[in-house]
Amino acid sequence: MRRVIDEIKQREADGQKVNVSVIAKENGIPRSTIRSRLEKPNSITRGNVFTEEQEKEILELIKQMQKGTPLTKNGLIEAVNSYLQVKYILIFKKYHFKKI
């Protein structure tokens, strides 16, 4: 995201016309997100929930689970919650997932 915003600002500084819709499509970022970041550059963004090590452990857990039956969204949520409970981490909250 930062790279895209910097690229747009650089193009504008060079006097080039910038088509945010095209850039959004090319980078797979919603146009409204790019516009919002351009209008409010100091807006707070949510940081990572997990450390890199935790992400790797969760990914390995998912890979192991997929060797059996297909993994559903609910199954994934339950697995990650179980992982966090085992690791004594209480940062996983309901707002990370939309209601099913």
Image: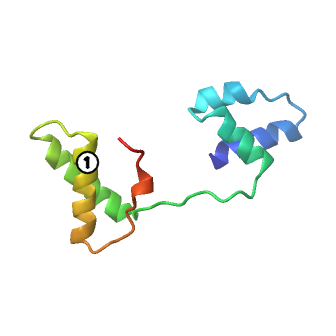
Q: Nearer the viewer, residue 61 or 8?
A: 61
Q: Residue furthest front?
A: 99
For the point 70% across and 26% down, which residue is it? 21
Image quadrant holding the N terminus, namely top right
Query: How many numbered callouts?
Result: 1
Q: Is residue 59 left or right of residue 23?
A: left
11 in relation to 92, above or below: above
Q: Position of residue 63 (x, y in %)?
A: 20, 46
| Disc 1 residue crowd, few under 14, some 14–19, many 20+, Cα 10 Å | some
Image coloring type: rainbow
Dot 1: element: helix
Q: Residue furthest right?
A: 15
The image quadrant of residue 34 is top right
The picture places residue 28, in percent across and down from the top left corner, at 56, 32
Whether residue 13 sits left or right of residue 68 in the image: it is: right
Q: Is residue 22 above or below residue 84?
A: above
Depth check: give the residue in front, 88 or 17: 88
The quarter of the picture where residue 15 lies is: top right
Q: What kind of residue is marked 1?
A: Leu
Question: Compared with residue 80, is residue 89 higher up or lower down, i.e. above or below?
Answer: below
Q: Which residue is mark 1?
A: 76
Q: Quadrant of the C terminus?
A: top left
Q: Is residue 85 above or below residue 6?
A: below
The residue depicted at 20 percent of the width and 53 percent of the height is 61
Q: Position of residue 87 (x, y in %)?
A: 25, 72
Judged from this view, the residue extending furthest toward the bottom is 88
Residue displayed at 67% across by 33% down: 31
